[in-house]
Image (cartoon, helix red, strand yellow):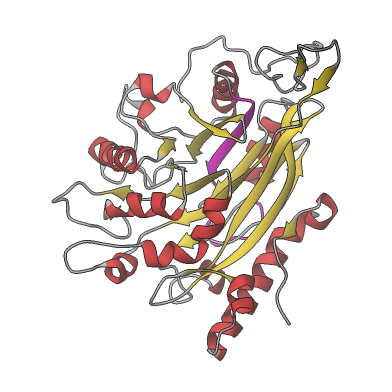
Amino acid sequence: MLLGAGVAFVTSRSDGEPGLRAAAGSSTTTTLVTTTSSSTTTTAPPREATIAFGGDVLIHSGVWAAADTGDSYDFSPMLAPIAAQLTAADLAVCHLEVTLARPGDPLSTYPRFRAPRQLAANLAAAGFDGCSVASNHALDFGEPGVVATLEALDEAGLQHAGTARSPEEDTRPALYEAGGIQVAQLSYAYGFNGLTRPAGKEWLVDQIDPALILADAQAARTAGAELVVVSLHWGSEYKQEVVAAQQEVADALAAVPGAVDLVVGSHAHVVQPISKVGEMWVVWGMGNLLSDNTPKCCREETTDGVVVTVSIGDVATGVGVTGIAFTPTWNERDTFRVLPAAATLAAGTTERALAADLRESFQRTSSAILALGGPELGVIPDRTLPP
């Protein structure tokens, strides 16, 4: 989002200390309701909700070929294994790394991606409510590609953050309601593979700039957000370690307490840790949700992904993250089904090779996620591997 100069980066609580905004119309997040029959007051129960986040949706030609029905494309069988989990969350957000085609547009794979527009409806049917769309491929087909993608998402009923069709649209954050809590999502990419935003149209795709992100976070709170989520397309491909560029951005955002509550990362195509920087939670990288990255081109870990379920709710300072659980997923070859590893094994499988792949994937993902003190922070898998 592109905002004018002079916007303050930090809101203040009603007690004057820097931090999260209090619930609208109240000096705290507790609502007092006076009964009509007596002077006794009752305290409303704390609000709570869950948000599910998924990794990169990167549609190579192999994926759309598997979804080809002859007269259309159907990705729903690939997403079906995680649909119940997404639907159970109060809010579910994907990361769409590719542009989507208009009817008649030729599809395209690496290095410039344009996927079937039916993908948007399939993502919505699986339980996603919206997607971050700022990525290094957002400009693969210029302004027409940005517009076509947003049109497809709009038709599917999916909200979006990170790209825009006008300066006015760019200044409007994606706002969601989850369990009575107003959640804003912002989205930015590190760059665009050598492509540049047209002069005067920098609003087409948002690029990572900590000062800009902080200003946008403040604007989102002014618009009513009680919790701010920032989706960042960052890091180094195929590196599970947090790199210096990621750390620098996270440090800058966390240096303004209460500005950003949660960062969720993409782009590395492998799972990275979950940790905290100051009081800000950071899901550094969620790997691939749906792609044709394989050991043939990359690393074994590119078949791994994770659905991260973040619990949020009323806390002493306003609204905050109250817990994080993760679901290791494995993107099955040929069918491209997104399989939750532990749940699939618990349901039983007679395929020894599949069972071995799922166990190995679960262990790789768990090790990566917990590598920066996750257990001490209470980060846990949503279920353990069956014996």
**Residue drawn at point x = 22 percent, y = 57 percent:** 107
Q: Which residues are magenta?
A: 225-242
**Toward the viewer: 200 or 351?**
351
**Residue drawn at point x = 62 percent, y = 65 percent:** 328
Q: Is residue 233 magenta?
A: yes
- Secondary structure mainly formed by the magenta segment: loop
Residue at far left of view: 104
**Toward the viewer: 178 or 385?**
178
Is residue 39 shown to the viewer in this render?
yes
**Toward the viewer: 69 or 295?**
69
Does residue 180 lie above or below 59 as drawn? above
Q: Is residue 200 magenta?
A: no
Does residue 89 lie above or below 329 as drawn? above
Does residue 20 lie above or below 98 as drawn? above
Query: How many numbered marks does the figure carry?
Result: 0
Left-right relation of 278 to 24: right
Left-right relation of 104 to 371: left
Does residue 337 lie above or below 254 as drawn? below
When asked about the image quadrant of residue 227, the answer is: top right
Is residue 273 shown to the viewer in this render?
no
When asked about the image quadrant of residue 319, the answer is: top right
**Toward the viewer: 270 or 199?**
270
Percent of width and height locating residue 268: 54, 56
Percent of width and height locating residue 194: 37, 44
**Which corner quadrant holds the C terminus?**
bottom right
Percent of width and height locating residue 41: 83, 17
When asked about the image quadrant of residue 250, the answer is: top right
Left-right relation of 309 to 223: right
Percent of width and height locating residue 144: 23, 38
